[in-house]
Image (cartoon, rainbow, N blue to C red):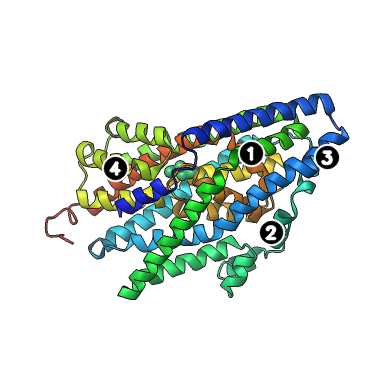
Amino acid sequence: MSSDAEDIARQAAPIGHGRLQWRILIGFLSGLALGLIAYTVGGDAVWVDWLVAYVTGPIGQIFLRLLFMLVLPLLFAALVVGISEMGEVRTLRRIGLLTLGYTVIVSSIAVAISLAVVNLLRPGDGVDPAAARELLAQGGEGARSIIQASAESEAGMNALVAIVPSNVVQAMSNNDILAVMFFALAFGVGLLLVQTPRTAQLKDTIEGLFEVAMKLIGLVIQLAPIAIFCFMFNLSAQFGWDLLFKLAAFVGVVLLALGIQMFGVFPALLRVIGRKSPLAFFRETREASVMAFATASSNATLPTTLRVADSQLRLPPKIARFVLTIGATANQNGTAMFEGVTVLFLAQFFGVDLTLGDQLFVMLVCILAGIGTAGVPGGSLPVIALILNGVGVPPEGIGLILGVDRFLDMCRTTLNVVGDLVAAQVISAVSGDEVDQPSVSA
Ligand code: ASP
């Protein structure tokens, strides 16, 4: 399994790596600078509108449509594989269930914290509503039709019932994320329950689908510098300097939310359930944190994480190996939090009022997305684009956060990896010695 994870990390390496990072940064800064000049000099000039409508707008749209094209197969495959791997090792089924339960509960806490922080501080508020509406109106045709589909979705009890799709093809064509995720979950569980040579083949095929989707997303991301230039130009030509302050507030809120989980929730879990001193834990896991920060990829950090669990934390190897390998893709607290903050921030920015129902939807999707997001640099981005569409926030907003994404990616990946180690520590403590006995040989 670990080699799978490493393979995938290698496949997707183009996302956010090496020179591309610099090109993205250059695209971001030059788009921002030219947009600000246009805002200062041109203001409402016709040529600025023309440029946005016929050049920078459409280029950004094409980039987004390419991402949307790939995100459903990617999410479906990642969820099916993630779930089915949780129970793959027969002897570890109990640990698998514990890991699943732990992941869902701790991710829920994480997402709840991030939504609370962003609702309290409201970093995206205060943008000129007229300008925001104008930008909303400009949303490309494709994005608008997807948004429309989800705006017609049910409310209240019916929304709950609608999570179970009666027609999965229809759910996919309506971009009904929760229903598709439900189907993927059910499919993953089914794959767990039937273990024959044919289902093993099917699982291989779905893993293949995942790798192809990752590869294609890697190629699409190569276009990111141009797309980001266009996004930043559009946004800064219309919002001016306000944009910079909002962006700084966004970074601050993401860091605050991640910090609460890292230095509040994790120490509590370690002390109460994991029977470990948080200070000693953080000291012993330093190597994995640094590696996660540097690579911005949970999967690439996996070998280091495994070593730390073994030589520093001295966890039972069987449990640690299992929890950490699955966790590198499926237990991503930082990612779930980041996705929650980003979606709500952009909703505030564009003046889209999210009802309690909408926020619960975001929360549910983020919890599942924590399981379904690939542990590679920039893994969150396609998922965020999808959620934005689901709640009617212009997906162009993603251009706003792409420019600061690398730094935030490094931070959230650190939380993801430390969270995996906390999970391994807690689950080891809960399961006692039973799995640590040499009798478990499979
Ligand atoms: N880079 C993250 C990780 O590898 C995933 C993401 O949130 O983009 O854990």
| Distance between the alpha carbons at the discs numbered 1 and 4 | 34 Å
Report the amino acid beneath label 2.
Answer: Ile
Tag 4 near tag 2, CB within 8 Å? no
Q: Could you classify mark 4 by the number of other residues whose Cα lies within 10 Å: few (under 14), some (14-19), or many (20 or more)?
A: some
From the viewer's perspective, is residue 317 above or below residue 34?
A: below
Residue 410 figure quarter:
top left
Name the residue tied to disc 4. Answer: 303
Which disc is residue 163 wearing? none
- Look at the image and tell me in which quarter the C terminus lies: bottom left
Q: Secondary structure at mark 2?
A: helix
> CA separation, marks 3 and 1?
18 Å
The answer to whether the beta carbon of the residue marked 1 is less than 8 Å from any atom of ligand 1 is no
Residue placed under numbered mark 1 in the picture: 226
Can you give x and y, in whole percent of width and height, for residue 283 in the image?
Answer: 29, 30
Tags 3 and 4 in contact by the CB under 8 Å rule?
Answer: no
Q: Kindly identify which residue carries mark 3.
A: 50
Q: Amino acid at mark 1?
A: Ile
Circle 2 is placed at which residue position? 146
Q: How dense is the environment of label 3, judged by Cα within 10 Å: few (below 14), some, or many (20 and up)?
A: few
Which SS class for mark 4? helix
Rendered location of residue 292, percent (x, y): 38, 36
Q: Is residue 196 visible?
A: no
Cα separation, mark 3 vs mark 4, equals 51 Å
Q: Are marks 2 and 1 in contact (CB under 8 Å)?
A: no
- Disc 3 C-beta below 8 A from ligand 1: no
Identify the mark nearer the N-term, 4 or 2.
2
